[in-house]
Amino acid sequence: MKPDALISDIVEILADAEEYVRGVVGSFIQHSFDKERSSVTIGISGTGLYPHYFILEPSEAAPGQRRMVFNGQSHREILEDSFWAKAGVRRR
């Protein structure tokens, strides 16, 4: 995937685009992210069938943001995200 890929750019390679987007939106709603201030970032490594993603919400309180990482296939939260290489994500 290209470094600045958007979900709309990868729809053709997702294993099930409708279910993937439903899962991302579901994570967003379930965890009460602010729809005006939050962003979803997709991983760009791998085949792109089920890219992992994180949701980032800026915050006034320390540490200044709320971030949750999710498995792209199960849409469950990934509690240990040390594998998430900063060079392999783009904010979109």
Image: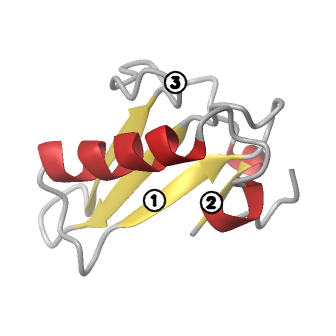
> Is the residue 47 above or below the residue 3 in the image?
above
Instruction: Give the side of residue 91 with respect to residue 1, left or right.
Output: left
Q: Identify the residue at the far bottom of this view.
A: 36
Structural distance between the alpha carbons of marks 3 and 2: 14 Å
Give the labeled residue for mark 2.
7
Point out the frontmost of discs 2 and 1. Answer: 2
Q: Identify the residue at the far right of this view.
A: 2
Give the labeled residue for mark 1.
40
Sequence-earlier tag: 2 or 1: 2
Q: Quadrant of residue 51?
A: top right
How far across and how far down the image is residue 62, in percent?
A: 17, 58
Rate crowding at label 3 as few (under 14), some (14 to 19) or many (20 or more) other CA atoms within 10 Å: some
Q: Residue at x 34, y 23 (%)?
A: 76
Q: Are marks 3 and 1 in contact (CB under 8 Å)?
A: no
For badge 2, the amino acid type reads Ile
Considering depth in this image, is 58 or 25 the residue closer to the camera?
Answer: 25
Give the labeled residue for mark 3.
73
